[in-house]
Amino acid sequence: MGTALCKRHCAFCQHHSDGSNERTSTPQQAGSSFYVNPSALQNRHVTLYNYKPRISKDLMVKEGEEIEILSREGEWALVQKVEDGGGENQVKEGYVPSSFVAEIGSLAAARWFFGSMIHVDVKRCLLRAENQNGSFLVWQNKEMNDIYFLSVRYGDIVKHYEIKDKANFQNLSRLINNYSNEAGYLCTRLTEPCVKLDRPSISTLARVVEWEIQYSSLQKGDLIGQGQFGEVWKGIWNCTTEVAIKELKGVDSKLKKEFLEEAEIMKQLHHERLIKLLAVCTDSEPFCIVTELMTKGNLHKYLKSHSEIRNLDISLLNGFAIQIAEGMVYLEERCCVHRDLRTENVLLTEMLCCKISDFGLARLLKSDRYSISYDAKVPIKWMAPEIFHDQSYTTKSDVWSFGVLLTEIITYGGVPFPDKKSHEFVKDLMEEVTISPPADFPDDLRDIVLQCWNHSSEKRPTFEELQTMLMNCNPMLKTVEFLSLT
Ligand code: ATP
């Protein structure tokens, strides 16, 4: 892999000046360039997204560029590409995230292939304003034994076609080409692949960056949020990378050790439905948490902004709930309790994908400070009854909060139990009064919420069960048609 280019161009490429056959890319070579024959790239891959260098050894790439992978280091790939350097071709070399590249001729490299998805997300993506009639994508349904579907936007609806035959790049490409020429069996001719806005998260700031970073490497921009534990700023790390910076107010030194231990645990939590913690600043005050930046803010704000006209499709709302449950399944499997699950702590990507925030470190901070009071800042109405009895937070108390979160979603960010003051609400809980969602709540979701609000915590469903129940509320669309590739 990667050696063919060097054997042909040793005179130029510096790699084998010692005559060795082994490609050993030293840090000095990464990010460098040299002249080469353009046909030399081997092990051909294509870049799926633009990547702007974050540190000096990184390589700038644009979506759709041909590159060669030389080696892989965890989440990063050392790659080279041939560039027209004013008449002469140059090879440039450096690091890019591995998830940003795919082998040419593989399904992953096709612009229309979206990988493993759930149908509500497919619909949400295709109905975005950036897409048009005939926009399409091919995806794989995890819940249905990895069956492949072709989904097409037709006006304001989405049609799904199950692909019956074995799917691979060749026959799927042929299928896409055929239906791009004429609609044939489909509702409409295929036009453009669905727009992809979100890039895969990268779990570290850069390839060789320590967990602890210097406060001076951060530049604060706009204030984007304010929580109980500090202010959240839009910021730039190392003059290159957009991040969110949460500056913690008054974290005393006795918390520091625990804080760092918890940060270590959070480092291990990687899931597309959880906010990525990228770095911390704890060497001096102010302590900071650096996370990926979520451009659309929190789900509560988003729902509120649509509360006047209430124009969001129920499948979009259901999709939010499914995604949050998906993130919670991951935490549940790791016995990680959130303690503060509500729409304000769910953040949205550009593509309106949900990521749960405020877990882990927040839990630690809160455990010291959350005394049960009727203070407006304590999320009384999201709290399970057992918390008022003995302050025991478990995954099942998160399930209770998830039921409340479902009512927030369906009521477009409405205050839960609006006709009850906090102390009245707690009194009801203590007396085991059955509480119910609003009268106009959809029946299938009402049943789920009531299960979450079982006073006996062990009788509440798990997040895994909740995810399945929510998926069943939105059964695979009745518009599924069968499409044969043969
Ligand atoms: P609380 O405990 O009251 O929830 P907090 O001090 O833990 O507050 P956060 O909930 O983490 O603070 O953040 C407050 C607000 O800042 C969020 O509701 C959100 O609007 C914004 N925010 C936080 N993190 C990000 C991020 N990574 N990207 C974009 N906005 C963010």
Image (tube, rainbow, N blue to C red):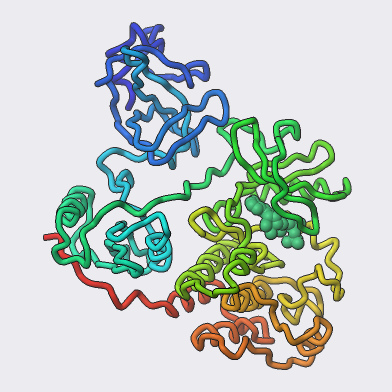
Residue 357 vs 242, above or below: the answer is below
In front: 296, or 481? 296
How far from the left and from the top, in percent, is residue 212?
Answer: 71, 37
Q: Percent position (x, y) of residue 120?
A: 42, 68
Query: Which quadrant of the rendered structure holds the C terminus?
Result: bottom left
Can residue 396 be seen by looking at this rendering?
Answer: no
**Number of residue marks:** 0
Residue 342 vertical position relative to residue 289 in the rendered view, above or below: below
Q: Quadrant of residue 388?
A: bottom right
Q: Nearer the viewer, residue 442 or 98?
A: 442
Q: Position of residue 405 (x, y in %)?
A: 63, 74
Q: Quadrant of ligand 1?
A: bottom right
Classify 195 as above or below 206. below
363 with respect to 450 (left or right) = right
Q: Position of residue 2 (x, y in %)?
A: 33, 24
Q: Nearer the viewer, residue 24 or 319?
A: 319
Q: Quadrant of the N terminus?
A: top left
**Which residue occupies 85% across, 61% down?**
368
Residue 465 in the figure: left or right of residue 135 = right
Q: Nearer the viewer, residue 299 or 68?
A: 299
Q: Quadrant of residue 390?
A: bottom right
In the displayed structure, 219 sits above or below 316; it is above
Residue at 33% x, 58% y is 132
What residue do we see at 28% from left, 75% from top? 479
Can residue 14 be spotted in the picture? yes
